[in-house]
Amino acid sequence: MNKKLSVADAKKHLSEIMSRVAYNNERFLIERRGKPMAALVSAEDLARLERESNKPKGLMAAVGAWSEFDEIDEMVQHIYKKREEAWDREVNLDE
């Protein structure tokens, strides 16, 4: 659980807080007038957050997962070509 601190308390006890973050993996939420303004987390937590935020999301993640498979790209191109060629194909909406 994150511990909440005022800006004044964070300034006053910064050295102690940094030690607790670095060695005990504690997290602190720094508030100004009761409103969350910043967080103090370990360098390891920050690195993990940055890795996660740089990962593609949604459909782009799915596309990226298949990007190294050349045959997938060829297959998709083949499907598009066949669909363009079959402009008069019947579509059954009851299925």
Image: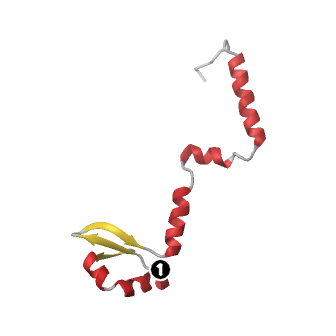
Indicate the quadrant containing the N terminus: top left, top right, bottom left or bottom right. Answer: bottom left
Q: Residue at x 75, y 33 (%)?
A: 75
Residue 16: x, y in percent?
Answer: 38, 87
Residue 3: x, y in percent?
Answer: 35, 77
Q: Viewed as shown, does residue 16 lie left or right of 93?
A: left
Q: Residue at x 73, y 47 (%)?
A: 68
Indicate the quadrant containing the C terminus: top left, top right, bottom left or bottom right. Answer: top right
User: Of all residues shown, which one is farthest toward the top?
Assistant: 88
Residue 31: x, y in percent?
Answer: 28, 71
Residue 21: x, y in percent?
Answer: 44, 81
Circle 1 Cα neighbour tier, 10 Å, few/some/many (<14 / 14–19 / ≥20): some
Question: Tag 1, which secondary structure?
Answer: loop
Q: Viewed as shown, does residue 26 lie left or right of 50?
A: left
Given residues 45 and 86, the one toward you in this image is 45
Given residues 89 and 14, the one toward you in this image is 14
Q: Residue at x 67, y 12 (%)?
A: 88
Q: Residue at x 64, y 47 (%)?
A: 64
Q: Which residue is mark 1?
A: 25
Q: Viewed as shown, does residue 17 lie left or right of 79?
A: left
Position of residue 38 relative to residue 65, above or below, is below
Given residues 56 and 3, the one toward you in this image is 56
Position of residue 12 relative to residue 77, above or below, is below
Give the residue type that dot 1 points to.
Answer: Asn
Q: Viewed as shown, does residue 33 lie left or right of 22?
A: left
